[in-house]
Image: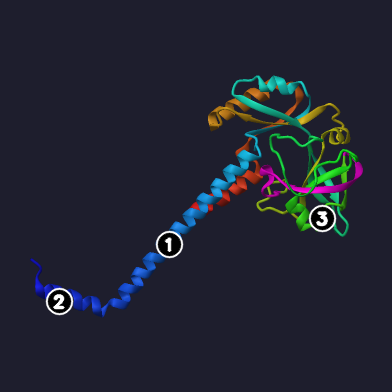
Amino acid sequence: MVNVTLFRKLTRDIRQRKWALLALAVIIAVGVGCYIGMACVYRDLDGSRADYYRDYRLADFTVDLKRAPSRVIDVVENLPNVKSVRGRVSIEVSLDLNGAEEPISGRAISMPLIPRPVLDDILLRSGTWFSGLDENEVILNSAFARENGLVPGSRIKALMLDKQHDLLVVGTAMSPEFVYLMPPGGSLAPDPKMFGVMYLQEDFLQKASDLDGAFNQLVGTVHNSSKEALASTLDLIERTLDAYGVANAAPVEDEPSVKFLSEELKGLKV
């Protein structure tokens, strides 16, 4: 049975402290709401990242070589745990833009002349794919193009192997490999104005980099992507391709852009 005296005291105390109790209730509601809101944002962003990586086939690993013939791709694809492999050319370039006070560092990556699904694919944001009418056509990373005021129809100059090439911008694109443009050399922050990524026709870039019929980089996916299994697979690939001058073999989590985005999401989760 409820003690009438205690009940009256309780109601009197509540009336006297109603504003403090209301403030406490509001604080709790805001805290719970903020937590739920940030948790939803994290889950949406993390899910979008996973979907983007899957839809545009982000590779599980990258292997840098000095030079390897195309037949090596079949050799690597037949290794245990390797699911698919793509050979490509990837070289550092120096870009000269109109109005730029100093040369801009960049990376040139080969893409097929005819658009088709490939590992580390790109999503066109403006313009078109290569027409095939001019081998000097280039597709630029959209963030780099935006920061430097470049659009389809613009022209840029790129220094590759001590030879300067005048390139016509036909499109801009984004890639899961370069969500953030991280300059080489261990940069701690993205710099899309001073570091650019461009995509060139495979045949043209092979000739421009003295790699006719060959490639200097492998990207691939694996069946078992656990840390231990991937490390074992990369070790096997390195030993198999030792004759072709393996310079680096790294899992996707070590890629600068992938690592930076992962840390950003971890911070949000915390």
Earlier residue among tags 2 and 1: 2
SS at mark 3 in the image: loop
Q: Which residue is mark 1?
A: 33
Q: How far, Cα to Cα, is label 2 from label 1?
A: 34 Å
Outermost bottom residue: 16
Tell me, yes or no, whether the two marked residues, 2 and 1, touch with CB atoms within 8 Å: no
Kindly identify the amino acid type of the residue bearing the numbered disc 2: Arg
The residue depicted at 20 percent of the width and 78 percent of the height is 12
Q: How many marks?
A: 3
Res 2 quadrant in image? bottom left
Earlier residue among tags 3 and 1: 1
The residue depicted at 70 percent of the width and 39 percent of the height is 121
Q: Which residue is mark 2?
A: 8
Res 32 quadrant in image? bottom left
The residue depicted at 86 percent of the width and 28 percent of the height is 212
Task: From the top left corner, tell me how far across and down residue 88 is, in percent.
Answer: 76, 32
Q: Is residue 106 above or below residue 20?
A: above
Q: Which residue is mark 3?
A: 150
The residue depicted at 85 percent of the width and 58 percent of the height is 100
Q: Is residue 127 above or below residue 216?
A: below
Task: From the top left corner, tell me how far across and down residue 35 is, in percent.
Answer: 44, 58
Specify whether residue 206 is in view: yes
Inspect the magenta stretch and tell me whether residue 169 lies in it.
yes
- The quadrant of the picture occupied by the N terminus is bottom left
Magenta stretch: give its range: 161-182
Kindly identify the amino acid type of the residue bearing the numbered disc 1: Gly
Tell me, yes or no, whether the two marked residues, 3 and 1, touch with CB atoms within 8 Å: no
Specify whether residue 254 is in view: no
